[in-house]
Image (cartoon, grey):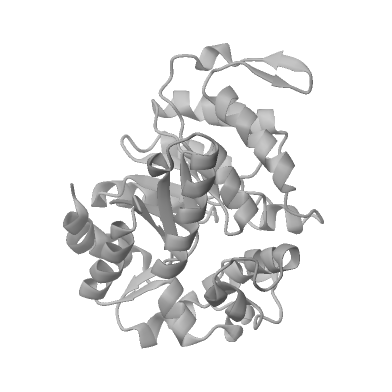
Amino acid sequence: MEFGVTILPDPPSHRFVELVQMAEQAGFTHAWTYDSHILWQDGYAFLTVAATATSTIRLGHCVTNPGIREPTVTASAYATLQDITGGRMAMGIGRGDSSRRVVGLKPVPVAEFERALEMIKELMNGRPVLWNGEELQLTWAEGHAEIPMYVAGYGPRALGVAGRVGDGIIIQLADAEITAWIIARAEQAAAEAGRDGARLAPVVCAPAVVGDPELWRDDVRWFPAMVSNHVKDIIATHGAGGGVPAVLTDYAAGVASYSYAEHSRTGAAHGRYISDAICDRFCVLGSIEEHIEQLSELAELGVEQFNIYLMAGEQEATLAAYGKHIIPEFAA
């Protein structure tokens, strides 16, 4: 299992760079950031400055989307960064939550999402595409290392896109039961499209803090509340059942309100709707041994990367604990 870290593009940018450098030195293979241009500074700019200050760690968004920028712009930006980094980019992409909702737009419709991802994947990797009736190609991107595309989703339709188009799946929670269901749905969609579902790389993303859960649960309650927003979209489309695990739909129904002004922020008021039990299921909390145990269960399901959302706990301490005690336990 590899390890990544997601760091918000908050000012000052040099702090972001410092944390990415610490992660690289600690043995993390990936550094990710958000793409929500109103709530934070621009994630593409942050990745660019991090690219020039690192040498081995892969960089990307967790996640960008095809609905705020025209999709060819997104493809060209990633191809450019792939050149700048010497082949270290990885794209995480979803339908667009906070970046679209805060400007009065809904997430990109699934059919449009799939069409855009098919094009982006080819164009950013230097291959020709047909887009809006025009034949396009980034000829200067030909011959570069392939940029993998990881597709985020919870519901059956988005997971279908992940299976048909993606190189991997972004799973925003660390619960083994739900993770197994998500992987199975994406692999099924891949198989139905004639692809090898076993080649999809699952990436689990969640806050992780080493220490007594009693001390840290309040720091992570924002995370299951954030997940509930996506789940409510699924409920609206498929109903409370819809083949989605009950642990997802049942708790989400209890989140009465959500403020994007506190999106992904420790101490967010909407965290009050989240129980201790859900915090423990969706996040990774406890002793070093408890972290290893939970992550080992995910690894047995085929999870290839655990991506820490570094918004909770003490950032340097978390990176150091993982680098010294946990990452070595999962070294190949």
On screen, residue 245 above or below 148: below
The residue lying at 54 percent from left, 70 percent from top is 245
Q: Nearer the viewer, residue 248 or 66?
A: 248
Which image quadrant for residue 324? bottom left
State whether residue 161 appears in this view. Answer: yes
On screen, residue 25 above or below 55: below
Q: Nearer the viewer, residue 324 or 248?
A: 248
State whether residue 7 appears in this view. Answer: no
In the displayed structure image, the side of residue 119 where residue 278 appears, left or right: left
Task: Give residue 162's position: percent from left, percent from top.
Answer: 55, 45
On screen, residue 199 above or below 229: above
Q: Nearer the viewer, residue 173 or 140?
A: 173
Task: Give residue 63's position: percent from left, percent from top.
Answer: 56, 49
Task: Give residue 104's position: percent from left, percent from top.
Answer: 82, 56
The residue lying at 59 percent from left, 85 percent from top is 272
The residue lying at 60 percent from left, 68 percent from top is 226
Which image quadrant for residue 132? top right
Q: How many marks?
A: 0
The residue lying at 47 percent from left, 35 percent from top is 195
Task: Give residue 49's position: percent from left, percent from top.
Answer: 47, 38
